[in-house]
Image (spheres, helix red, strand yellow):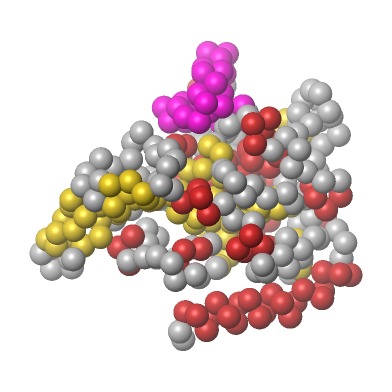
Amino acid sequence: MNRRVRVFLAVLLVVCLRPLQADDPGCPDAELFSGKLITDICWGCLFPIRIAGLSIGGGDRPAAASNQVVCACNDGLGIPHPGFVVSLWEPARIVELTRAPACSPALGGIRLPLGSRRLLGTAGKSEWDASDISFYNYHWYAFPLLTLLDLFFEDRCNADGMVDFDILYLSELDPTWNSGELAFFTNPEAAWLANPVALAACLADAAAASAGAPIDSLFWCAGTWGLLYPFSGAMPNYGSRPSETSLSATRALAALHRRGLARRTMGNEALCSAPIDPFLTKSQYRMSMFYPLPETQSNHVIGESAFRWGEWRSLPGPGEDHLYLLWRWNDCCATF
């Protein structure tokens, strides 16, 4: 089936299901497939676009990005094909953080047929300390926006082969997201990171992230948002919904990397094929809020202080659920 036909049918399905959300005020509609798909995206965040070493537009690129101009990749027969390096910030994923299990604002506010009340999330009640915890369910979607809109690009530059909007992961089906003890078995290194020295090192990452350059070697830190470990949904509540949901999204991303479900798309080693990367490379990613209050002029790095980009981006009630667009730096070899 033609890709455009599949995209049209997906949008039509969401539109047909939208009336269902009117009877469920606890599950808001983010209106992802509407005019907001154009107006609420930070299109300037695509830049800089680098083609054969020449930059188009302004903006920052990661320090570990490829510095090559020309390249060569082997085909299935091992024959090398020359090309040039293309790099840009690619909108690749949508992650939604919801308190209600199985609620999907990205799909028009419908409830998926899964989950239970034991997975009911909370934003927490503490305002100024960590005496309470927050918990959000997350849903991970493939969202290759440039491919969906036929704006870009060559097959080799599609790191994971995703060409359509699709559900990739649901935390309601993952027992480790609901239990820090079970999560420990997927990330046992958390045991030696639970010490004052490792925690103090995160101060440096917080300062660097707020300046726009998170420190990749401090992989256990998420800047001003907190600690990445454990890879579970319960975390201390500091009264800031954007910070809480951003940390949840980053923990989910780190867990997917650990399980081989996310790839490294940055650097010379990723030019011909994106290798599986078990550790999260923070500088490869940026995030922008799509719902409830979108970031349309900029995005932010992992760990950047919410006071710089969105401490106010939360609304009482349905506006406490959040959608983020995940951007990743993509280095690829466009062969002839």
Q: Is residue 62 at least partly visible in the picture?
A: yes
**Nearer to the camera, 253 or 189:** 253
Hey, which residue is sitting farthest front in the picture? 57
Q: Which residues are magenta?
A: 196-225
Residue occupying the point 57% across, 32% down: 303
Q: Where is 57 relative to 78, above or below?
A: above
Residue occupying the point 40% across, 39% down: 61
**Nearer to the camera, 92 or 307:** 307
Name the spot of residue 195 as percent of width and height, x first: 56, 16
**Nearer to the camera, 256 or 85:** 85
Q: Where is 279 relative to 43, above or below?
A: above
Q: Where is 215 relative to 36, above or below?
A: above
36 in the magenta segment: no
Name the spot of residue 114 as percent of width and height, x first: 72, 65
Name the spot of residue 140 as percent of width and height, x first: 59, 56
Residue occupying the point 67% across, 79% down: 13
